Amino acid sequence: MATNALRSLWAEPRPAHAPQRRPQDWALVAVLVCWSLVEVVLREGLAPRPLLLLVVLAVLGPLPWRRTHPLAAVAVAFSTLTVVDLVRLFTGSQGTLLNSTSATLVLTYALFRWGSGREAASGFGFILLWLAITFVADPTSLEDTVAGYAFFLFAAALGAAVRYGTKIRVRDIDQAKAREREQLARELHDTVAHHVSGITIQAQAGRAVAATHPERAVEALATIEDAATRTLAEMRAIVGVLRAAQDTEFAPQPGVAEVERLATGGQTRPRVDVTLRGEFDDLSPAVGAAVYRLVQESITNARRHARHATRVTVAVTGDADRVRLTVDDDGSAAGGRSPAGYGLVGMRERAALLGGTFHAGPAAERGWRVEAVLPRTGTPR
């Protein structure tokens, strides 16, 4: 397991969209340069001036490129610091370096925030090598040595934490967008597709009887006009919600009470009969809307796919803690009906999101049956 974790870290890519150089970066460099000049003027016991100049250039120069080239920035800065400490160690030069070298903590943070796994591991090797040499060049107490390592480990850990926190936030946003797209797809499928399916059926019926029963063709045209008007209204409502600000007051969703409106009373084929039993007064609005959409989609599927179907029976029962829904049609089972498709996928997702169950398949005798059980509160399990 540890080996897999290390391999995963090693293969970690760079975060996308690393920021380019900003005016704040140059301002940071200017502040650190001024700090270095003040140290040179006021502090005593510093290392020789040429070494100090080399350190300032090596540490502050790569800062503006620390996000786009984190490993190169770390390599330049810490390699130069290592060479300077080696020169001091072998030549016996006395004096300490400038406190502005603490900017190396910023480079360490950037390495783990913006570098890939390979870059972070390689760059941390430069950092550890310099720390080992600099504590030899400038002997300190054990507490100071431990504190020095702790500062750089903290900078590395902070960069990694910010990196993965941002990654998780981006992932959550992507998941939220995916859920919104799925919800929009279900709404489009369950509303617009339902009405368009009815328009298609009425158009086919009107064309079939136009020559022999013109009055029935006129009735079909009236039904098509009504369905098209409702489709246009629902499309405008969906587009309005997508374009509106976040504080838009949404129109109430259809519920169980509207299920009875889906009954046709024999005016169209197949005939749709709806029966409601039990109590629905304290039903969760989300559950009521789901029941309506499930019934609506089941009727649409029956009209599209149930061969020779004459009747669709809808039964919704409100029990003490759940709502039961069954939709049966008497269509022919010849050839069967494929369980795949966006309609069934959307219905199954609706039931699952509310903590319910869903099943669709051939009935025992003939036709097709849709069954769903939803908790009254709509609380996911």
Image: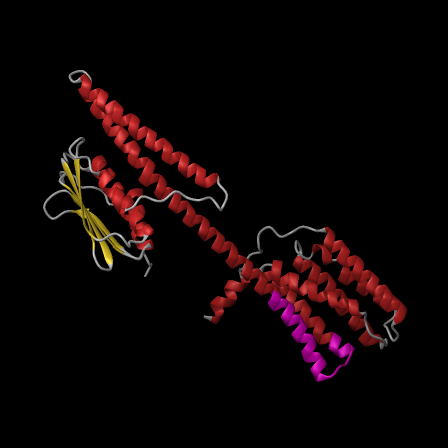
Q: Is residue 52 magenta?
A: no
Q: Position of residue 185 (x, y in %)?
A: 37, 42
* Residue closest to the eye, 187 or 97: 187
Point out residue 179 in the picture as x, y percentages from the top left corner: 41, 50
Report the residue at 24% width, 57% height from top: 322
Q: Is residue 61 visible?
A: no
Given the current orientation, which residue lies at the most extreme right position? 41
- Colour treatment of the image: secondary structure
Residue closest to the eye, 372 or 98:
372
Task: Single out the residue that lies furthest toward the top.
Answer: 211
On the image, which quarter does residue 74 sit in? Answer: bottom right
Where on the picture, by quarter, is residue 215? top left
Give the residues drawn in magenta, as a range: 134-158
Residue 239 in view:
yes
For the C terminus, the image quarter is bottom left
Left or right of 155? Residue 262 is left
Which residue is at 69% across, 72% downward?
A: 129
Q: Is residue 366 left or right of residue 350?
A: left
Asked if the stretch drawn in magenta spans residue 145, the answer is yes
Task: Measuring from the top left, give residue 114's x and y in whole percent.
Answer: 62, 58
| Image mark count | 0
Residue shown at the point (23%, 29%) measured from the top left? 201
Depicted 368 relative to depicted 114: above or below: above
Q: Quick check: 206 above or below 251?
A: above
> Is residue 249 placed above or below 62 in the rendered structure?
above
Quarter the N terminus occupies: bottom left
> To which quarter of the image does residue 64 belong?
bottom right
Give the residue displayed 28% in from the left and 55% down from the top: 282
Q: Position of residue 157 (x, y in %)?
A: 60, 68
- Residues 52 and 150: in front is 150
- Predominant secondary structure in magenta? helix
123 relative to 318 in the view: left or right: right
